[in-house]
Image (tube, helix red, strand yellow):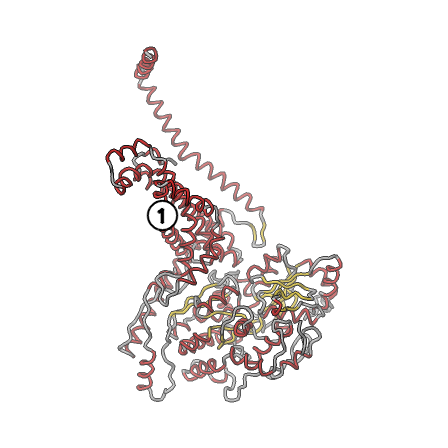
Amino acid sequence: MIDEESRMSLTTVNLSQLTITEQVVKVSKSILSTITNVMLLPVIGITIFLFLWSISAQSIHTSLGTFPGPNAVVQQFSSLYEEHVVEREKAVAFYQRQEKRNLAKQEKNPNYVGKIRAYTGKETFVDQIITSLFTVTCGFLVAAIIAIPLGIWMGLNKRLNSAINPIVQIFKPVSPLAWLPLVTMVVSALYVSDDPMVSKSFLTSLITVSLCSLWPMVINTSIGVSSIDSDLLNVSKVLRLPTFTHIQKIVLPASVPMIFTGMRLSFGVAWMVLIAAEMLAQNPGLGKFVWDEFQNGSSDSLARIMAAVIVIGFIGFLLDRAMLGLQRKVSWDKSSASV
Amino acid sequence: MNWKKTITSSLKSLSLSLALVCAGTYIAHAQTLGEPEKEELKFGFIKLTDMAPIAIAYENGYFEDEGLYVTIEAQANWKVLLNGVIDGTLDGAHMLAGQPIAATMGYGTKAHIITPFSMDLNGNAITVSNDIWKKMKPNIPKMADGRPVHPIKADSLKPVIESLSSEGKPFKMGMVFPVSTHNYELRYWLAAGGIHPGYYAPHKGDNSGQIDAQALLSVTPPPQMPSTMEAGTIHGYCVGEPWNQQAVFKGIGVPVVTDYEIWKNNPEKVFGITAAFAEKYPNTTIRLTRALIRAAKWLDDNSNANRPAAVKILSQSNYVGADYDVIANSMTGTFEYEKGDKRAVPDFNVFFRYNATFPYYSDAIWYLTQMRRWGQISDDKSDQWYKDLAAKVYRPDIYEKAAKSLIEDELISANNFPDFTNETGFKAPQQHFIDDIVYDGNQPNAYLEKFKLGLKKGDKL
């Protein structure tokens, strides 16, 4: 024991005796390697990818022309944006015409109460992105509101866990495409209203997304809760904390890392499911955009789909980062929130 | 974004009081058309050039002129579209002429659908794959310049099918829906060339339409026709534009015959709404018909002068979305058969002239005769039955009201419409069929007796 301690102190001395220049070199080396890791390597990777993409794209001939390379996709990005701007201008004109018409009607009939309707024109690429983001967030929140309390309950109660676990395990691997027809029919049967708050297609996408993103959250939350350190549980027992305080002060903080891992997994699933659901059910959103372009079969279609693919990937990445940031913010053990 | 559109709360319309006010102030216009009862409407369509009247009525502001705020939405296939209209997600839609008839009759989903407006004449073609074309071509008579003589008859296809079947290979073709115009046109063409397209037997639960068939027909959604043929699943198809021209542009097939050549100026799509909608919202129904009539007229005005502008609109991704050139090929009065063999077909797409928009009873009855011919109607029906059903679905009365109010508003002059005082709703016997058989809508049963192939009086499978 003594031997080991003395050796350790020796190394400490050695370290402190390093010259300043050596230290500077060491620090700058580490900075350099961070720069290489964070900046240079990704740039090299992307460049090689773009190069390979444009080379291989040229040699793939489809019946809609050659496969789009990076150039074609960039072009489509700008034309999609232009279309968005044009559509916005049309929308402004639409509202002006509507106001005029309402005024004319009011002149004829003073009792007429004018009403401004939302623009009836087409949804642009930007609109579709916003719709998709809104739907996925709503679907995910609905899933979280159900899954987290259920997961905590299952984690606390072994019997409930064994009762529900088989159901969770069976439903977890079900593809959204299998749920979709059922959801569509149930929604159109049950959601009947002359003046609906939200459209049926929105509800269908939302429920499908929720159904598929529920399970990773339930499983991770219940595992997180059931594997809390027994010391913590004993503390709670000694203090005789009431159930709610026990959950609030002990269970939640201790299982936050696992809950968030589940939420991140779920959000990823939710995003993938949404695109598939929109595509199949013709619900507004990025998935519908991709499907419509595929159906159109114009010479720009492939490039537009590729543009959508890139946007879908990028948004998925940003959503994941956002969840990670949130996790870092709320968990007490910062190291648990690793990339 | 639909959730936004629907989130705004709706107001009950004041049509009745408004109509009264109007009647009071303008005594001369005692019949003035009231305000629409329902102002926000959603129409469905399938990505085909013949949806043009709907797109034009929207883009040219004809719907807005009627006080209608219309959203137009592409549908995945004809079944989804029909279900949308039946369950109310769609207020109306671009439909196959056979759809309202079959739905009202109860073949497939039963629902009372009516049509006040016929959308166009012609506009379809039959395309075969390059491989089949290569084998067919030697059987076709040639003109002096080496190009095939038109119309190409299915006689030239018959040996190809026979040699395929001797190898044990089935001959398959795609059409868009069991009660679609395309199904009947394709069957008509094949049968005229002596090829049996197969019977349906719904009373036995057999809706495949392949009993006794020499050519197996199956359903494929229009936009997927070219890729399905490219994949080799089908040897050819009958579909509307731009999906035949698409095959030429992609170099994967050759259109052999247009439906104009199978039956000159045949009725094609109709605008379908539920009977309940027309009853609940009479003013809206007349107003939307007015807008569609104006759009159809614009499409045909000055001998198709507006067509290039229309093609530009249709090529937008939210409408048909195919390339301008592909759509323009058929919409502007030409049709490209074999690559480079471009011929003038000025009436390939007719939207207004020849009273194209008027819903003739005789058109509905023709579809019914074909349904009987191929077994979709299992039993014999009396001539009167055909006429009663046609009158239940086709509603020239609504069309007449819309047309008369357009004349009164001096938007379209009366000579553009049929003479309503003498109009019976039956066209004079029509002659221009590919097999030269004459069709008289007043005598459906006698017409059925004229065919070599098909069910006749007393036949039941």
Q: Is residue A202 above or below residue B281?
A: above
Judging by the rendered image, the residue that carries numbered circle 1 is A144
Picture quadrant where residue A103 is located: bottom left
Q: Amino acid at mark 1?
A: Ala
Q: Residue furthest top?
A: A3
Quadrant (top left/top right/bottom left/bottom right) for the C terminus of chain B: bottom right
Q: Residue at x 64, y 81 (%)?
A: B445
Q: Is residue B219 above or below residue B375?
A: above
In the structure shown, which secondary structural element does the residue marked by tag 1 occupy? helix
Please state if A160 lies on the left or on the right of B442 as rendered: left
* Closer-to-camera residue (B122/A39): B122
Quadrant (top left/top right/bottom left/bottom right) for the N terminus of chain B: bottom left
Graded by Cα atoms within 10 Å as few (under 14), some (14 to 19) or many (20 or more), the crowding at tag 1 reads many
* Closer-to-camera residue (A197/B148): A197
Q: Is residue B313 visible?
A: yes
x, y (%) of residue A207?
41, 54
Name the chain under label 1: A
Please state if B437 lies on the left or on the right of B417 as rendered: right
* Closer-to-camera residue (A146/A128): A146
